[in-house]
Image (cartoon, grey):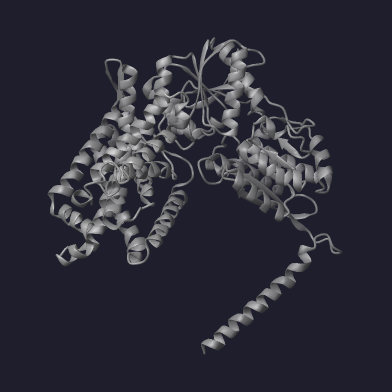
Amino acid sequence: MRKWILCFAALALVLGGAIGCSSDEPTDEGGTAEQEAQPLKIGSLSPLTGPYAADGNDIANGVRAAISVVEEQGGIPGYSEIEFLPQDSACDPKQAVAAANKLVNEKVKGVVGAYCSSSTIPASEVIVAEAGIPMLTPASTNENVTERGLQNMWRVCGRDDDQAVVAVQFMQDFLDAKTLYIVDDKTTYSQGLADNVERLAKEQGLEVIEHDHVNQGDKDFSAVLTKIKDVQPDVFYMSLQNSSTGALMLIQADRMDIGADIVAQDAVYHPQLIEIAKDAANGVYLTFGYIDESTEAYKEFKEAYAEYGEPGAYSGYAYDSATVLLKAIEQAGSTDPQALREAILGMDFQGATKHISFKENGDSGSNYIIRQVQDGKFANYWNPATGETY
Amino acid sequence: MDFFIQQFINGITLGGVYALIALGYTMVYGIIQLINFAHGEFFAAGGYMGVIILSWLAGQGFMQTHPWLCLGLSLALTMGYCALLAMAVEKVAYKPLRHSSRLAVLLSALGMSIFLQNGLMLTQGVYDKAYPTELVSGAVMLGGVRVSVMQIIILGVTASLLFGLNALVFKTRIGKAMRATAQDKVMASLAGINSNRVISMTFAIGAGLAAAAGIMVGLYYGSVRYDMGFVPGIKAFAAAVLGGIGNITGAMIGGFIIGMVEIMAAAYVPHGGEYKDVFAFIILIAVLYFMPTGIMGENVDDTRV
């Protein structure tokens, strides 16, 4: 009896496999005689697990929101639907490269990501340099992302060298700071930014008392904060990779009453920061891209994003990245890398986060301003172009 | 001088947390020679259970009227919950493997750690959860030194739990049974001790202490995250080894040393914040080089559990 069952099982497997294969064949050979509509595959790379999962999920959700808007308007001609393949890069270069290879094997036509600059750079070597697939980062601000001469590497957010300029200008012109204490958490992003700030501050004649480092995943910053309290700098520049470390540091700084103005940056910008640090977050300054929330495009984004909750720091940039990609595929009428590059270079429209147009090197320009946490909200605070408060 | 005292207080606060977690590693190792890699997850689970209970109490308005009662209640419930969780983990993942190779149990512990951490992530989400911290705001100034109320609470709770544990192990019947099982499991069971029950109790007590540490850390730092168990777990494990794994007093001393070295390295060594973990582990290696059994590792037979 058992033998019979086994035989049947084996037979069923073989048959099932054969049927599966035969039915797969025609769809695999895309664009044959019948021109059967296929799904358009686009991927994303962002940390869906690990310490940066909050920002990473915001990015995936931003792409989802952009896809839902395009699908609602009738989708992209020639494709049955848009298939989204979110991959977990875990802010780990090794995993990012593995995920990038997976996306290439899945034959995606474009990728939004990654989050950490240290993942974006190696992943783009696979996706852009080897496979020629366009990649748009919504969040990686390190200069080298677009400084390597890749033809299809685009950046929708700003750059750290621009961000550092605004931060130092603000410290000097508005806060009238003479001394500065810098702490970073040793990622490509946070340390790169902190190094830029240190260099610029020294050029501008500010005294950098110390440039200290902490480890990612630490919870206790009492030692370094006690040091800051002891030396009494005018400004404490807190360069961290994510908002949850930022919240921990702000709570402890508040309890210790360190007494310096705190300046942070875009990676710390997240509703979570205020939710966790509560009153301790009040008064903190951050450099962040200026977003005009009164535009139609922003309202459309906010509505499409509603089902995922409040937009995080990079939700809007991810939404714009995906929108650029989908628009480019539609306008180019093909997924040929060169055609896509031309279509993306020709972009000129109002996105949710900024006016979108790209330079030859893939940057889309920075528009950093200073925001401040006021009464539990991020408020526009200081405009570097005019030197005035909003 | 104020700077040193301030850093010293930071050091013992952190050390107290490591000591509480380290006890679980050392007790379990003492009794079944297993390095329970899932132990850090009990700490994380405690942090989460604490935030769930305290947020509910705060929502009901009890937190504002009876803050100390709420703290005590959440501490007791959380410790109880984690004790039960640890007993369940032991039944499911370790007991069936008790007679197989040590490596099998070790792998099972690693698997359990990943399982519990992912369980937390899936049920509680990837975002940080904020603790209601109204209870613990404020600080006391002693000269130029600022001691926050939360640091006082951590030190108080840690000290009472450490004394309580010492009394339990050295003064009670169950403590005697634990010590006997640690010395010789077969002989102890021949003498009428139910070793299964003793092992279960050991897991429960260790996890209870880790849960208390979890709730303290949540209140002190203001938030918890699903992967919070990993790093403190490793540090506490180092503390247990430093103190002489299997030895209760050793784990306490080891915890305080690791916490203190970390803080002092960050405070006094240039760029120390970056290398504080390196210093903690250098101390560990140095001690093990000269005393391979750890600081308190000599009198293994009398006091290990």
On screen, residue B38 versus residue B193, left or right, reads right
On screen, residue A349 versus residue A161, left or right, reads right
Res A171 visible: yes
* Quarter occupied by the C terminus of chain A: top right
Q: Quadrant of residue A29?
A: bottom right
Pinpoint residue A356: horizontal percent, then vertical percent.
Answer: 74, 32
| Image height of B169 relative to B132, above or below | below
List the single residue furthest toward the bottom: A1
User: Which residue is rendered at x = 54% and y = 32% of the image?
Assistant: A186
| Image height of B97 relative to A50, above or below | below
List the single residue furthest toward the right: A33
Pinpoint residue B249: horizontal percent, then vertical percent.
Answer: 23, 42
Pinpoint residue A6: horizontal percent, then vertical percent.
Answer: 56, 83
On screen, residue B177 versus residue A175, left or right, reads left
Question: Which is more toward the observer, A94 or A343?
Answer: A94
Q: How many marks?
A: 0
| Image height of B237 relative to B63, above or below | below
Q: Quadrant of residue B51?
A: top left
User: Which residue is rendered at x = 61% and y = 19% of the image?
Assistant: A199
Pinpoint residue A337: horizontal percent, then vertical percent.
Answer: 81, 45
Res B60 visible: no
List the single residue furthest toward the front: B290
User: Which residue is rendered at x = 30% and y = 29% of the image?
Assistant: B151
Q: Quadrant of residue A155?
A: top right
Question: Which is more toward the observer, A344 or B212?
Answer: B212
